[in-house]
Image (tube, coloured by chain):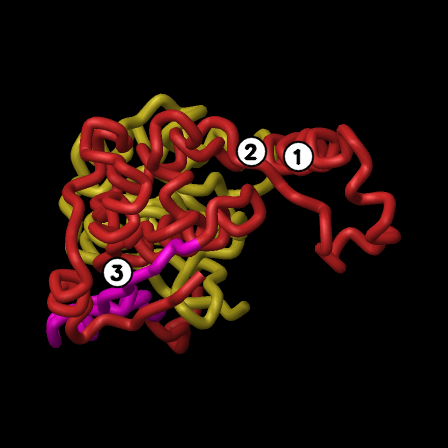
Chain colours: A red, B yellow
Amino acid sequence: MTATTAPAPVPTFGDEVDEDGGRKLVIICSKGSLDMAYPGLVLANAALSEGVEVHLFFTFWGFDIINRKTMDHLAFSPVGNPATHMPTALMGLPGMQAFATHMMKKQIEGLDIPEVPEFLELITDAGGHLWACRMSADMMHLTEEDLYDRVEGIINAADFIEMSAGAQTLFI
Amino acid sequence: MTMAMIADREVHVDEEGFLTDPAEWDEQLAKVLATNIGIELTDDHLAVIRFLREDQAETGETPTLRRVARVGGFDTKELFQLFPKKPAKKMAYVAGLQKPVGCV
């Protein structure tokens, strides 16, 4: 030990920023395919563990993520998806979507990433808020009874604008 | 990575202050690290920290928040109470480990 060694720095964890009102993130989840559901869920979870206030707003096809009937069965569609790097004509063959979905689910599981319902549980345990879109609910004839029980409410566009005041907003 | 003083001992830290050599850590140091970030270390904190240490020793990686909850059997809400706002990073800091690299 030498007398010249400096004291170790202490991480600030950005706490001083939070004291100025904090950071808020709103993620609009508008798509219900497996590959489009995860980006919002992963980012929401990451933001929460960084101390950011997070609201997820589910609209249109994004309803599949919080609809009790569909949330366990999101699929990955390879049709017209250039990310598969396969001829489009092949992707429409019977069984291809089920196969592609199976492959993607296996990869997700391999990375120890939770399935959709468990992910929503994790997000709400971490303090995240889930909201459903009024117009989508009306169009699809769904009520709160049909939705994942941790969805806090069905809100309209004006409510959403109010709720997202001052937030960084992502549309997925 | 530089040598720096924490309490009365010399340790290796990165530029943010996270320990870079897990072997230089013990529970006495954990108390000082916790105090540094405004946490008074209790047995509940220590139970979590011990899991982080064991898991890191096994896998070579600092466990993510979800892994601490799922594999360690801790409640996510409780982790947020024990290590407010940024549990994953604060747990890692007190445990003398690097920040977790996993996304989930």
Q: Position of residue B24 (x, y in %)?
A: 47, 47
Which of labels 1 and 2 is toward the front?
Answer: 1
| Mark 1 or mark 2, earlier in chain | 1
Left or right, B49 with respect to B37, comes to right
Q: Which residues are magenta?
A: A8-30
Quadrant of the image for the C terminus of chain A? bottom left
Label 1 is placed on what type of residue? Thr
Chain ID for label 3?
A
CA separation, marks 1 and 2?
17 Å
CA separation, marks 3 and 2?
23 Å
Quadrant of the image for the N terminus of chain A? bottom left
Q: Residue at x 15, y 72 (%)?
A: A165
Q: Say what secondary structure mark 1 lies in.
A: helix
Give neighbour class at mark 3: few <14, some 14-19, many 20+ (Cα, 10 Å): many
User: Where does label 2 land, which residue?
Assistant: A112
Label 2 is placed on what type of residue? Asp
User: Where does label 3 land, which residue?
Assistant: A52
Which of labels 3 and 1 is toward the front?
Answer: 1
Which one is in front, A47 or B45?
A: A47
Label 3 is placed on what type of residue? Val
Tag of residue A101: 1
